[in-house]
Image: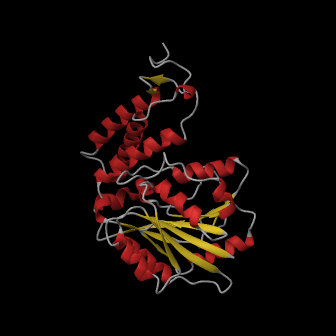
Amino acid sequence: MIVTVAICTRNRARALERTLRSLAAAAVPPSLSWEVLVVDNSSADETPRVIANASDALPVRAVDERQIGLSHARNAAIREARGDYIVWIDDDVLVDAQWLRAYHDAFRARPEIAFFGGPIVPTFEGSPPAWLRLALPRVDNAYAARDLGAAPVALTRDTLPFGANFAVRSDVQRRHPFDPALGRRGTALSAGEEWAVLEAMLAGGESGQWVPGARVEHVISAERQSVRYLRRYYVENGMSLALTRRAPGERVLFGRPRWAWREAVLQELAYRVRRAYAPADVWSVHLRRASLAWGLLRVPVRPDHSSTSSDGGR
């Protein structure tokens, strides 16, 4: 068996170096051949040097993808991967010592499974602010936290793995490339490219499995430990949801879902009022809901998704 570990990166040399060091310390089963494929998405920092230096400790290959966008970079990795499986991780994670072994064992035990996912545990640089420690259970998806328990359960549309730590059988992945309209582009935080692919696999009859032993830590930099980051993340997350999970037949007002207007206004008011006196685990919920709704409102409803006119159906 051959496994390709794919990392897409852009201008994050320091984080990438840390991730590659953790990969070099991972246990590799004797029966496994593997490669580390790093897709450099037009970086202007020390990324090429970091990749080159890692070649002493890892079977690493560099791929240049000049078209900026995470989906473009992921598709470049698919084209170049030599493995029977592609294991996707972000350039700011630290893999557990048994991470690769856990995936390898799952692949061997269930070769009919198309995709797999493992736990993601946020680890904060420095000391996170007190409000964030309190709010974290309410906003942990903004930091890619994922934990479905200690059993290797089946993955469904409601329990899909996150993009920082998942694996796909290569033959299935090549039938399902990533949509360039989705995913991060430059500094934008848009997501959803992996949701769309995995949901398409499920719709096509493929199955997924949780791999509890394939654990990674997601290192959260200081600039992401702010209300401003959460606002931006959830707004762009709402935009991604509008593109990937919008229900057909929605009633619209000014070309946007009617319910989203009400949700945005009411949740924004609740956030602003409760931010003044309530603890962070209360007001962060309203911030999240308001921001998601504002993001949904940025994306107009396509005509085939609406059952009414843009005047609200009157």
Where 125 falls versus 263 (above or below)?
A: below
Q: In which quarter of the image is residue 291?
A: top left
The residue depicted at 47 percent of the width and 61 percent of the height is: 145
| Closer to us: 180 or 166 | 180
- Residue 311 position, x and y percent, is 44, 16
Residue 153 appearing in the image: no
Where 100 falls versus 235 (above or below)?
A: below
The residue at the far left in this view is 276
Count the marks.
Answer: 0
Where 4 falls versus 290 (above or below)?
A: below
- Residue 151 position, x and y percent, is 65, 67
Q: Quadrant of residue 40?
A: bottom left
Image colouring: secondary structure
The answer to whether residue 87 is left or right of residue 313 is: right
The residue depicted at 59 percent of the width and 83 percent of the height is: 28
- Residue 206 position, x and y percent, is 71, 54
Q: Quadrant of residue 305?
A: top right
| Closer to us: 10 or 27 | 10
The residue depicted at 46 percent of the width and 87 percent of the height is: 56
The residue at the far top in this view is 314
- Residue 112 position, x and y percent, is 75, 63
Residue 9 appearing in the image: yes
The residue depicted at 58 percent of the width and 62 percent of the height is: 79
Can you say which quadrant of the picture contains the N terminus?
bottom right
